[in-house]
Image (tube, rainbow, N blue to C red):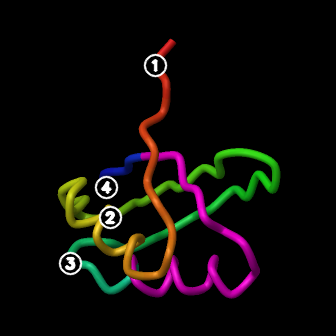
Amino acid sequence: MESTTFGLTGLKHVKAISNVTHELSHLQGVTGVTIKVEPQGISLLTITGTSVPAEEELREAVLAVGCELKPLAVA
């Protein structure tokens, strides 16, 4: 099982969370989508699966529902 985490912006309403989850869940290899909502900042999006799709594919899927992936700062 693989997983990856990104920042996510554009979650302006509860329906956006459902939309992002729906779009990502239909990508090949994805078995789970978790979003930790940060109302005043960048939310955390974790994707798990047998294989995680390429970042560009993930970016296009969330952009289709009005959200945007953000890289997380590495400490």
How far, Cα to Cα, is label 1 from label 4?
A: 22 Å
Q: Which mark's residue is nearer the viewer, 1 or 4? A: 1
Which amino acid type is shown beneath numbered disc 4?
Answer: Met
Determine which residue is flagged by label 2: 49
Q: Residues within 10 Å of mark 3 (few under 14, many from 20)?
A: few
Q: Verify CB contact (< 8 Å) between mark 4 and mark 2.
A: yes
Which of these two is toward me, 11 or 25? 11
Q: Verify CB contact (< 8 Å) between mark 1 and mark 2.
A: no
**Which element type, helix, strand or loop, lies under badge 4?**
loop
Earlier in the chain: of badge 1 and badge 4, it is 4
How far, Cα to Cα, is label 4 from label 3?
A: 13 Å
How far, Cα to Cα, is label 4 from label 2?
A: 6 Å
Which amino acid type is shown beneath numbered disc 3?
Answer: Gln
Rendered location of residue 74, percent (x, y): 46, 19
Determine which residue is flagged by label 1: 74
Rendered location of residue 24, percent (x, y): 39, 76
Rendered location of residue 16, percent (x, y): 63, 80
Which of these two is toward me, 7 or 53? 7
Q: Is residue 19 magenta?
A: yes
Q: Residues within 10 Å of mark 4 (few under 14, many from 20)?
A: few
Which amino acid type is shown beneath numbered disc 1?
Answer: Val
**Which element type, helix, strand or loop, lies under badge 2?**
strand
**Which element type, helix, strand or loop, lies under badge 3?**
loop
The part of the chain drawn in magenta is 5-24
Determine which residue is flagged by label 3: 28
Q: Which mark's residue is nearer the viewer, 4 or 3? A: 3
